[in-house]
Image: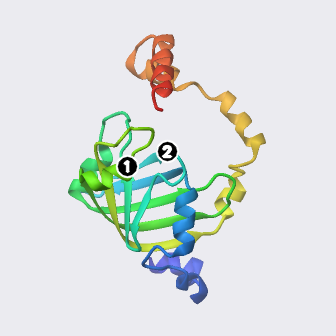
Amino acid sequence: MAEVRARLGEPEAMIEAKIGDRIDRHARRFIAHSPFLTLATADAAGRADCSPRGDYPGFVKVLGERTLAMPDRTGNKIADSFRNIAENDGVGLLFFVPGTRETLRVNGRAYVTDEPDVLARMRTEAKEPMLAIIVEVEQVYFHCGRALIRSRLWDPASQALAAELPSAGEVAAEAMGADPELLERMLEEGYRKLY
């Protein structure tokens, strides 16, 4: 780290001052508008995992200035995040709002719950999650938009790149030695059942 600091220098005091330890009104509003985040976890050996989480804007609930609740919606049932949280409770969340350059970073400790009162708060269209992840917040701060500006993530012209990629069905079929058309139909059927 000393070598890294020698090259980068120290952060300005103003930058370090923006790191808070609670969900203030600005962070609360950003979370209420966010339909997508990434959840970073690691197992006991430090092997990292990062998974996407998404739902209607505000799917993550602010239970208090130092507590968040995130529903676990139907997915692939691999449960990497749950396994990691059971072994190592440190987590990092990165919230996105479409069209907004800045992101919101939240770091803390997590645990899994099936508390009925918490799950009821995350019901959508009569669907209640079976489990939720509670995050006890330790750090909160807005991250500048340089990465999203450089990536042109929200630029519609950038979305043309998607046409060059194989479909999820094609990728899965190759990995499993299965019929790509069948897997593509299964994926599409699963997507239609989301809501």
At x 45%, y 38%, the residue is: 125
What's the amino acid at mark 1?
A: Pro
**Which numbered marker is on residue 134?**
none
Q: Which residue is depicted at the point 57% across and 63% down?
A: 30
Q: Position of residue 113 (x, y in %)?
A: 25, 54
- Up the image or down, 136 lies above or below 8; here it is above
Where is residue 183 shown, x and y percent of the image? 45, 17
Q: Is residue 4 left or right of residue 159?
A: left
Residue shown at 46% from the left, 11% from the top: 182
| Number of marks in the rendered image | 2
Residue at the far bottom: name it: 13
Of the two numbered discs 2 and 1 on the same chain, state the one appearing first in sequence: 2
Residue 26 percent location from the top left of the image? 57, 72
Which numbered disc covers residue 71?
Answer: 1
At numbered mark 1, what does the secondary structure look like: helix, strand or loop? strand
Q: Secondary structure at mark 2?
A: loop
User: Image quarter for residue 102?
Assistant: bottom right
Q: Nearer the viewer, residue 126 or 60?
A: 126
Q: State left or right for residue 76 relative to residue 165.
A: left
Can you identify the residue that label 2 sits on? 55
Q: Quadrant of residue 166?
A: top right
Q: Residue at x 52, y 46 (%)?
A: 56
Estimate the x, y position of residue 178 in percent, counting from the top left: 41, 13
User: Is label 2 in contact with label 1 (beta carbons under 8 Å)?
Assistant: yes
Nearer the observer, 72 or 90? 72
- Residue 186 visible in the snapshot: yes
